[in-house]
Amino acid sequence: MKRHWFSAHAAGSAMCVALLSSAGVLGIIAGCGGNSSSMTANSMGTINVSLSDPPSCMPPNGQYTHVYVTVRSVQANINATAGDGDSGWQELAPQLANQPMQIDLFSKPQTTCVLAQLGSASLPVGKYQQIRLLLVSNTPAASDMVPSTNACAGNGYNCVVLGDNTTHELQLSSEANTGLKIPPGQVLGGPIVVTAGQSVDLNIDFNACASIVDEGNGMFRLKPTLTAGQVGVNASGIGGKVVDSVTQQPINGSVQIAIEQQDATGVDRIVMQATADSNGNFRFCPLPPGSFDLVIVGIGPANLPYNATTVLNIPNGTNLGAIPLVAEAGATAPAVLQGVVTATTGTTPATIDVSVSALQTVPSGNNTTLQVTIPLQTIPATNMMPEVDSTGTISVSDTANCPAMGAPLNVNCATYTLVVPASNPSVGIYSSSGFTYSPPAGGDVLFTVDAQAAKPNSGGAPDCMPAEKTTSTNSVGQPLKVLPATTTSVAEIDFSGCS
């Protein structure tokens, strides 16, 4: 995931400044003098923008080795409901207008946390509720500015590179014109507050791994998943070291770590996701103020699965030390959930993008529970079995995968696969006095599958009525229970009232 940072500083005090927004680029006009302007130096700040992202879907955990996007503008708006063409969008990195920046979202950060510095600008004080990034079109006009070098050569200006070193254009929808949106609900900790004469830093996290739709025909499309939050440049973030609970050594395999926060429905959603390094270490930074939850999963040698380990209520600035994962004794591989999603307008098949997640319920203290999102995994290939990849983002766009029986009339269908632990999570609840991890609970291992529908080529706008559906049953109506090295069929998820 990638982040963009913004920092606000005082402007000069001897002149009044008017800010004009045109074609997404902020112009700054000085002059006028006296007290006739409301845009005085005392009502201005400066914003600095940067980007970072710990990718989690590089081989062997996924098929992408590089994801390139070319940014031409970063903007913010005080109005929480401002539309694409409404006034009030303030440019945060005007330097990009003449020098668009192509960024590999999977490259190593320039510093511990920051991937790339995007620019800076002055802007009026206020509480900024929406943010958007505008990308260079894959087919720019002759008059459009483009970067001097292009890693996507022949494949637009936004592309993915697969593990076989082939490059594919990353198709955009409205992103080149209206931007990748970060609405108020995805600005962590509330609006970005710019105060006169003060600094503010904003992190935008670009979850590249959740933002790519593989259409299965050699075509890849961008369905942006971004979050943002006001942070301090010296924030230390949250870190730790993942170890085997018995050996206390790093796990020789794949370890996925997710930082999560509750959404409006009370479900923990992934904010950022990363892989542990060869020594088991990880660090999420920078982070906005507040507390976060952590969910970790792992697969060791010979596809040995580990239970999920969850740590709740972790404040920013915490080093968790060693975090033990418990191996699933006797298991030869994780569990697999597999299901079908359908979409209809009511009279004709509908085309939608769907993000599919696996949820588990954990105790959260004081006799309460919390649903957390389990990071998805890949089962490596063996001499006996091919690789099994999770497909958390799918395109429901044709009838080819519709089941012979059970699907409604007039629908498009798509299948999904979710690789998950076959055990219940271990849980630790953070407190100032310290914490211990509960052992994984015995009994049935139950999951809920959550599906969220969006309009293709819309930048992620919700679709269908309702736009989110869940199921906790299997294909024969029983509780959705999983077993190691076993594929469980999930009850069909049917979306209707889609556009």
Image (spheres, rainbow, N blue to C red):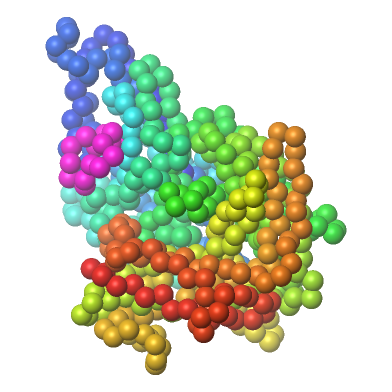
Q: Name the residue at the bottom extreme.
A: 404
Query: Residue 276 at what x, y percent from top left?
Result: 66, 54
* Image coords of residue 367 (percent x, y): 64, 50
Q: Is residue 47 magenta?
A: no
Q: Is residue 203 left or right of residue 346?
A: right
In the image, is 302 to the left or to the right of 108?
right
Q: Is residue 421 above or below residue 41?
A: below
Q: Which residue is drawn at 57% across and 39% down?
A: 291
Image quadrant where residue 24 sits? top left
Q: Look at the image and give the residue range highlighted in magenta.
A: 75-96
Which residue is situated farthest in the front direction here? 367
Quadrant where the C terminus is found in the figure: bottom left
**Residue 142 visible within the image:** yes
Residue drawn where x is 26% and y is 8% of the image:
14
Residue 487, by quadrant, is bottom right
Q: Residue furthest top?
A: 34
Report the front residue among 89 and 490. 490
Residue 115 image position (x, y, % from top left):
50, 44
Residue 333 versus residue 309: which sits nearer the camera?
309
- Tag count in the figure? 0
Q: Can residue 218 be seen in this view?
A: no
Looking at the image, which is closer to me, 308 or 346?
346
Query: Is 89 one of the magenta-colored residues?
Result: yes
Residue positioned 38% across, 28% down in the render = 193
Residue 233 position (above or below residue 150): above
Examine the rendered structure and indicate whether residue 42 appears above or below residue 457.
above
Q: Main secondary structure of the magenta part?
A: loop
Residue at 60% in and 53% down: 369
